[in-house]
Image (cartoon, helix red, strand yellow):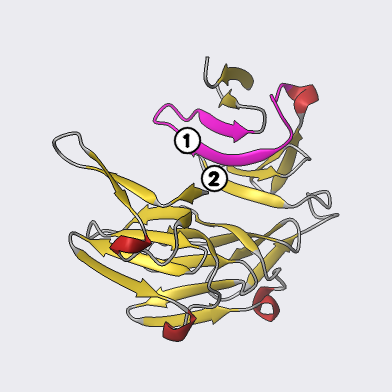
Amino acid sequence: VSQSRYRLTKDGKLIRFTQDNGLTNNTVHSLTTDAAGRLWAGTASGVTRIAGKEVVNFTEREGLCSKVVMCITIDSWGNLWFGTSGGSVCRLDGERFIHFTEKSGDMGAWVYDVHCDRNGHMWFASSRGGVTEYDGTYYTNYYEGAGFTSAKVKCIEEDTSGRMWFGTSGEGAYSFKDGSFRHYTRSDGLSSNHFYCFLTDSMNRTWMGTAGGYITIYDPKDESFDHIVTGK
């Protein structure tokens, strides 16, 4: 969560962007850039789209499913998806919002992360626990007893081999490939069981942001975990 956002100019200057410049709220939860180079900011009061000097805001008045936007992602067709707090998920098709409610896929109303995989399937991490996979027609729910414990999944990633990663709040991380889950905790080498984010690099190593100021790096070549302590 960021209090406003900053833009780095070509000449190296850092410019602060706040509600005074048109941002819907100074509390920013998520940022992404679309194919046209426009920046989208998910905030505590909606979504702001920034293209140069043009600033456009989207709120519940424009059809957004909740004013609090926790995450933004772009699917294989360039559509934007918004995971919200209290309104589940919605997708922006052009200028129209399509709502995917709790009843749509048995998801929770609070969606912490949304991810589009290499097959174009959408994955949702919600307050229901576990994750929900949506292939455009059908939903598949992976809850307690179907690969997960009852812990809430907070973040989702896919590495270059197609392995899915799910980070939880207190129960470590799960990988998913070829229909099978694998559970990792501190006893397996993680620096923490509380996860915030993932990023996979060009060498297919998965970087994991966890609690306590640690970054854990998973290398699939030897299935090892390495650690970086931030701020040192």
Task: Indicate the quadrant where residue 20 lies.
Answer: bottom left
| Contact check, label 1 and label 2, Cβ < 8 Å | yes
Q: Residue 225, position in %: x, y?
A: 63, 20
Question: Vertically, is 3 above or below 194?
Answer: below
Say whether residue 209 is magenta.
yes
**Residue denoted by label 2:** 157
Instruction: Tell me the residue at 79%/50% (across/down).
Output: 151
Question: Vertically, is 158 above or below 60?
Answer: above
Label 2, secondary structure: give it: strand
**Residue denoted by label 1:** 200
Instruction: Tell me the residue at 61%/27% (across/down).
Output: 213
Task: Indicate the quadrant where residue 79 lies.
Answer: bottom left
Task: Indicate the quadrant where residue 103 lies.
Answer: bottom right
In this rendering, the count of numbered labels is 2
Name the one closer to the observer, 146 or 32. 32
Q: Residue 8, position in %: x, y?
A: 25, 41
Q: Is residue 208 left or right of residue 79?
A: right
Return the mark for residue 175.
none
What amino acid is found at the position of numbered circle 1 in the picture? Thr
Residue 222 visible to the viewer = no
Question: Vertically, is 229 above or below 154?
Answer: above
Range drawn in magenta: 189-210
Query: Mark 2 or mark 1, which is nearer the start of the sequence?
Result: 2
Label 1, secondary structure: give it: strand
Q: Residue furthest left?
A: 11
- Crowding at dot 1, Cα within 10 Å, few <14 / some 14-19 / many 20+, comes out as some
What amino acid is found at the position of numbered circle 2 in the picture? Glu
